[in-house]
Image: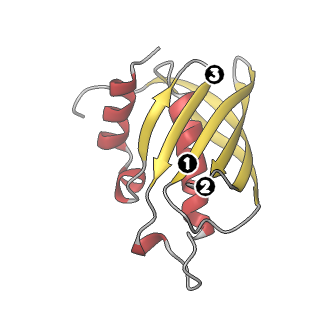
Amino acid sequence: MLTLEEIRAHFRRHDPVSSSLGIEVLDVGREYSLVEMPPHGCQLNGMGAVHDGAVFILADVAFAALSNANGLYCTNAQTSISFVRSGRVGPLRGEARVLRSGKLLSTYEVRVTDAEGGLVAVATITGYGVGARLPLGDA
């Protein structure tokens, strides 16, 4: 399993979308990850809430941090997400947990909450294990 710093370094080097949104990996284990996103101007919609697209990206990054923690690429094959309420109070956090881990397909649940602990979204994500190693150097 990769260390937290290796996972953070990978996202900094190879995931410009999460970096541009200010998403940070706070914790990762064998069956859990926690990521955080501070809301700011480019993420807000016309009503002043975090855009659902940014919430989706936060959920996807939580899934990616967990599903790639073994050092092998796992890609998002399918996502079902329910937006429960507007994300207005930041930072938003995405917590991913493994529901089932298989050889090629695995299933994860991601819960996105606001700074008050209110549920913003719930996603069920199916990951496909590509089998290729994550690039951990400066490439």
Q: Earlier in the sequence, mark 1 or mark 3?
A: 3
Give the Cα distance between marks 1 and 3.
17 Å
Give the residue furthest to the top: 1
Instruction: Give the left or right position of residue 103, taking residue 94 as reference.
Output: right
In percent of width and height, residue 122 lies at 74, 50
Which mark, by number, is residue 29? none
Residue in the picture at 59% in, 84% down: 47
Give the residue furthest to the front: 116
Instruction: Check disc 2 and report the residue beneath it.
Output: 116
Give the Cα distance between marks 1 and 2.
10 Å
Instruction: Give the left or right position of residue 10, taking residue 87 as reference.
Output: left
Q: Secondary structure at mark 2?
A: loop
Give the Cα distance between marks 3 and 2.
24 Å
Please name the colour scheme applied to the rendered image. Answer: secondary structure
Q: Residues within 10 Å of mark 2 (few under 14, many from 20)?
A: few
In percent of width and height, residue 37 lies at 46, 54
Is 129 located above or below residue 103 in the figure?
below
Q: Secondary structure at mark 3?
A: loop
Residue in the picture at 55% in, 64% down: 89
Which mark, by number, is residue 31? 3
Q: Are marks 3 and 2 in contact (CB under 8 Å)?
A: no
